[in-house]
Amino acid sequence: MTQPWQYVVSMPQPENHLFNIQLTICDWDADFLDLHLPVWSPGSYLVREYAKNLQDFKAIDQNGKSLNWLKITKNYWRVESLKQTCQISYKIFANELTVRTNHLDDTHGYFNGAATFMFVPNYENHPFTVEIVVPKNNWEIATALPHFENHASIFFADRYDQLADSPFEIGIHTQVKFEVLGKSHEIIVWGDGNPDLGQIEQDTKAIIATEAELFGGLPYDRYLFILHLANGYGGLEHRNCCSLIYPRFNFRGDHYLKFMNLVAHEFFHTWNVKRIRPKALETYNYDQENYTSSLWFAEGATSYYDQIIPLRAKIYGKDHFLKSLGETITRLQNTPGRQVQSLYESSFDTWIKLYRPDANSPNSQISYYLKGELVCMLLDLAIRNSSQNRRSLDDVMRSLWQYYGKPEIGYTEGELYAVIETVAGTNLQDFFLKYIHSTDELDFNYYFEPFGLELYAGYAQKSVYTGISVRSNNGVVTVKSVDANSPAQLVGIDANDEILAINGFRVTAEAFGDRLLDFKPHTEITITLFKQDQLKTVTLRLEQPRCDRFMISEVKNPTPTQQKNLQNWLD
Ligand SMILES: [Zn+2]
């Protein structure tokens, strides 16, 4: 066997948030050793410049003698090796608690491979070992990587991708272990809160079994869920594990169901995007953006199934599903950017847009998660309807798994469309053109009709329309965003303006929406505000209330076909 390159990760003083990383490469046989640290993590499409957290880079030979080195680019180091054993060391500052970054303090250490480990270009298939040196005896190590031989604290990665894809959680944990279809699963929890782990185990098992049934088995030997209970929300998928972060006291009622959606979502990625990958992600380029127009499917289909799978697993019923679907449609219809950016553009430009939202984002962008989910639902309904319930989006997923996922061949946009059309048995070019490449409004009722469902528009609060969204900044009404072409934009109200009064009377963030209920459309109000510290008063002409809430109901007298279609879809 090839001698693996050896990483050692220690954290002797966790309070300083520094991981010490050491890499030993025995008998390097070239004059130079080139080392790169990735700039992004697969699954989270933003250049995060992990090298900004790196310090104290050193290189020595087997006798401890310093080796010359220089930096070639922001994330690229070149060591003069003179054909011998090289030992590289550096420190990674880790004080950002998200699923895709690193965090180390006196309670735990969590790190992502891509944000931590360097790779050697052209040696991506060289194996690695990772030894973890814990700072306290009672800290335990959780990772999806297998143990190296029989060492308790040394792990093995057969190539760099596996190393980059396997986060570590090190500390004191609550742990749940169970089996599904003979495969071992673990949930490792860091932090305190109010989750009922018995319930989570039962529902997670049901989700795993339901997704395995869809794809015909589980494509791994062991799977790990890392759950951080903290002040945050997010998930990141890996091949044999996922990281989840969830608000520590949000495990009751609808919040709990939302947590199970997150579990179903990240687990669905085990197939869709970790193995069934767009062509641009077939081989990851860790040095730069990896452009693909197919994230609407990688994330959109996954978001659609994160709603459908818990329903099939009986974690909630049809009413909750339809209520939640109405809320998703409400979010789409309340985003003016849906008429500006197509799903295709949203996918391609994620590197500069989705992960970098600003006050103009609602006016200029649409999330490929949000619209992708709804477009995938329409595709599912279209396929079910045209095939008289003989086929569905499930068959699209299974075909993609068969032809692209299992052999891990990336699919092109054209191949994805071809698979969908083959399953649907019909030409969908017009659908793709309107809903993926253009910004046409989604015609929900056309697709709902055969299922005896109807979308209707209403009002959250029937209030005059100004186009202003506000947030509270220590009680001060602060403008979050202003709709394009709205009454507020016409008079120059901008994000970050501080609203002090309506018609001369002080207004608070809590009361802002309520005060507007007192006014009629086509009348005028004055708004007094601070704009960049300057006091101003503007006169705003109010418009008719806009429908801002969408709900789905079953038609009163469904036909037998409608009943059958709906049952087939949701029961
Ligand atoms: Zn996702």
Image (tube, grey):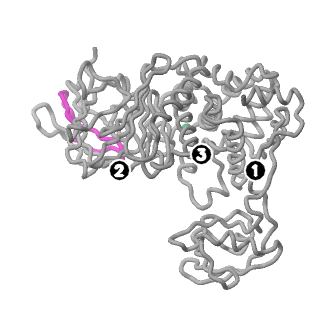
Q: Where is residue 285 in the image (x, y as percent from the top left)?
A: 46, 34
Q: Earlier in the sequence, mark 1 or mark 3?
A: 3
Q: Is 75 inside the magenta-drawn segment?
A: yes
What is the secondary structure assignment of the residue under circle 2? helix
Can you tell me which quadrant of the image ligand 1 is in?
top right
Q: Indicate which disc residue 254 carries.
A: 3
What is the secondary structure assignment of the residue under circle 3? helix
What is the secondary structure assignment of the residue under circle 1? strand
Vertically, is 482 above or below 63? below
Image point (31%, 24%), residue name: 156
Q: Is 386 inside the magenta-drawn segment?
A: no
Vertically, is 150 above or below 74? above
Q: Is residue 291 rendered to the left or right of residue 98?
A: right
Q: Which tag is nearer the camera, tag 3 or tag 2?
A: 3
Vertically, is 231 above or below 30? below
Q: Indicate which disc residue 550 carries.
A: 1
